[in-house]
């Protein structure tokens, strides 16, 4: 029997045109649209996932990459349990911009141990950034790492599953009864307790 451990807020950020909306559409709807339009403000979808016997509801926030369409940035980050930072493996500049996005995460995130994942998207295209470079960046900055293609589907499901698995394994992020300053050795790491809101 599986138990429901609440709703996780997942944020997708990164430069414009790297495929944030496409990753969300591929994951939630199983589709790819080569003519998808730019996000204005924020888009939002919900999906339920079963991870290690736990039913989790994901509230996925797909944010605009274009500065002029980014409004209310702090509210995107409020209460987020996981952040997916995306770059385009076929456009080096989007990799070079990662430091700026990481600074934004550190400025606005409210749950300090929110799980961070780096995703190199568009691996179906000619490469401008090698896999090893992405791996190294993620390791240096303590992020999970995966490469993907929203077009071919490769890596997309794995990215969300790995992120959510890590969140499930970090109960201080979502279990209201968990106190991070107290270590209770009798406590299991799994499915217990409090529901989280995502707003
Ligand atoms: N070849 C290829 N094209 C992709 C992939 N992912 C997205 N695209 C295309 O890249 C373009 C931009 O995709 P979006 O998903 O709108 O990018 P975004 O990051 O959400 O852009 P903003 O909303 O402006 O922040 C679209 O034409 C997509 O079809 C991919 O994995 N491979």
Image (tube, rainbow, N blue to C red):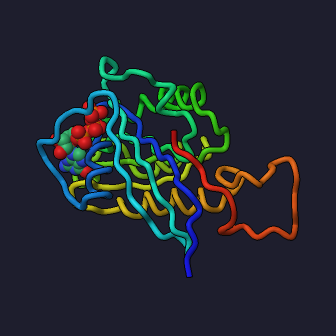
View quadrant of ligand 1: top left
> Closer to the camera, 58 or 120?
58
Left or right, 34 with respect to 171, comes to left
Q: Quadrant of residue 114?
A: top right
- The residue lying at 47 percent from left, 32 percent from top is 76
- The residue lying at 44 percent from left, 55 percent from top is 146
The spot of residue 42 in percent (x, y) is 34, 33
How many marks do you count on the picture? 0
Task: State whether residue 179 appears in this view.
Answer: yes
Q: In the current view of this chain or complex, which residue is farthest to the bottom?
A: 1
Task: State whether residue 133 appears in this view.
Answer: no
- The residue lying at 33 percent from left, 28 percent from top is 41
The spot of residue 34 in percent (x, y) is 13, 46
Q: Quadrant of residue 78?
A: top right
> Closer to the camera, 85 or 138?
85
The vertical placement of 18 against 152, above or below, is above
> Closer to the camera, 49 or 103?
49
Q: In the current view of this chain or complex, which residue is farthest to the left?
A: 35
Left or right, 10 with respect to 177, comes to left
Query: Which quadrant of the figure contains the N terminus?
Result: bottom right
> Closer to the camera, 96 or 103?
103
The spot of residue 89 in percent (x, y) is 32, 44
The vertical placement of 96 against 194, above or below, is above
- The residue lying at 36 percent from left, 34 percent from top is 63
The spot of residue 148 in percent (x, y) is 34, 55
């Amino acid at each position: 029997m599986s138990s429901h451990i609440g709703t996780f807020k997942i944020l997708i950020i990164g430069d414009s045109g790297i495929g944030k909306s496409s990753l969300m559409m591929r994951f939630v709807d199983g589709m790819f649209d080569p003519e998808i339009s730019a996000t204005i403000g924020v888009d939002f979808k919900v999906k339920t996932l079963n991870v290690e016997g736990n039913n989790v509801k994901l509230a996925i926030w797909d944010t605009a990459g274009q500065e002029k369409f980014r409004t209310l940035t702090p509210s995107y980050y409020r209460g987020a349990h996981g952040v997916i930072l995306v770059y385009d493996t076929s456009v080096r500049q989007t990799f070079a911009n990662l430091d700026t996005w990481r600074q934004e995460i550190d400025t606005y995130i409210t749950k300090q141990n929110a799980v961070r994942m780096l995703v190199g998207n568009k691996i179906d295209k000619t490469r401008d950034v090698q896999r090893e470079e992405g791996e190294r960046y993620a390791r240096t900055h303590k992020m999970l790492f995966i490469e993907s293609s929203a077009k071919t589907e490769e890596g997309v499901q794995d990215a969300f599953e790995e992120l959510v698995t890590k969140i499930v394994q970090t109960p201080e992020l979502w279990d209201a009864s968990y106190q991070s300053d107290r270590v209770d050795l009798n406590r299991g790491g799994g499915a217990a307790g409090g529901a989280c809101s995502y707003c």
